[in-house]
């Protein structure tokens, strides 16, 4: 299991140092800012949704390695998903990072399973879920500020 853990750590480090889909998305029809006061993570999420499907998603901001890697992975996974699929993936992801390894959930989440270890560090769950809560608020056009507190 230590080899798998090392691989997962490498993926997280890679996504935190070279985040995918990083930057402003000028044609976004949804956007939202999120903040994690505990860790200082801040992000802006930009989403292009057409006919109920996420076509593009990008983010900008700064944060800890887990926060940035989670946002980067999320932007890759959510492309092409419907709102119903986004909700299902959100629920599985939240279960993964709060309860830990679960073969069924991990098989559904694919590459997002690299963040399963976050469950071992409860203070880091808010780092991992910031982008996800921000996404839900963005596509719902929720006017409330997104904060993990």
Image (cartoon, rainbow, N blue to C red):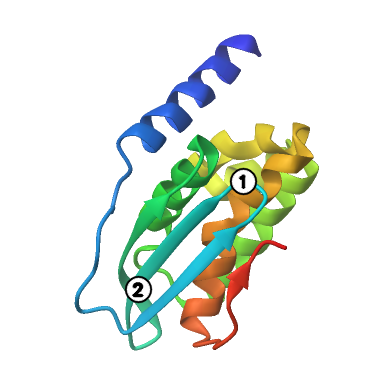
Q: Nearer the viewer, residue 41 or 80?
A: 41
Residue 83 visible: no
Q: Quadrant of residue 57?
A: bottom left
Compared to 80, does 65 lie above or below?
Answer: above
Q: Quadrant of residue 81?
A: bottom left
Pointer 2 local density, CA inside 10 Å: few below 14, some 14–19, many at least 20: many
Pointer 1 local density, CA inside 10 Å: few below 14, some 14–19, many at least 20: some
Q: Quadrant of the N terminus?
A: top right
Residue 100 is situated, as x and y percent measured from the top left of the image, at 75, 38
At horizontal 49% and vertical 88% (from top left) the residue drawn is: 141
Q: Quadrant of the C terminus?
A: bottom right
Residue 56 visible: yes
Does label 1 or label 2 sit earlier along the sequence? 1
Tag 1's secondary structure? loop
Compared to 129, does 55 lie above or below?
Answer: below
Q: Nearer the viewer, residue 15 or 107?
A: 15
50 relative to 135 in the view: left or right: left
Q: Quadrant of residue 99?
A: top right
Residue 38 is situated, as x and y percent measured from the top left of the image, at 67, 50
Residue 148 is situated, as x and y percent measured from the top left of the image, at 67, 61
At horizontal 68% and vertical 41% (from top left) the residue drawn is: 124
The residue indicated by pointer 1 is 39
The residue indicated by pointer 2 is 47
At horizontal 48% and vertical 57% (from top left) the residue drawn is: 42
């Amino acid at each position: 299991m230590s080899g798998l853990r090392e691989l997962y750590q490498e993926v997280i480090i890679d996504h935190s140092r070279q985040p995918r889909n990083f930057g402003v998305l000028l044609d976004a029809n949804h956007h939202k800012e999120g903040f994690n006061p505990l860790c200082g993570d801040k992000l802006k999420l930009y989403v292009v949704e057409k006919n109920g499907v996420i076509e593009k998603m990008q983010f900008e901001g700064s944060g800890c390695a887990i926060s940035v890697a989670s946002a980067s992975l999320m932007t890759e996974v959510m492309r092409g998903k419907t709102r119903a699929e986004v909700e299902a993936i959100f629920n599985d992801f939240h279960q993964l990072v709060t309860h830990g390894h679960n073969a069924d959930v991990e098989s559904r989440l694919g590459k997002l399973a690299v963040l399963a270890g976050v469950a071992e560090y409860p203070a880091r769950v808010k780092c991992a879920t910031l982008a996800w809560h921000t996404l839900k608020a963005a596509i719902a056009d929720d006017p409330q500020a997104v904060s993990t507190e």
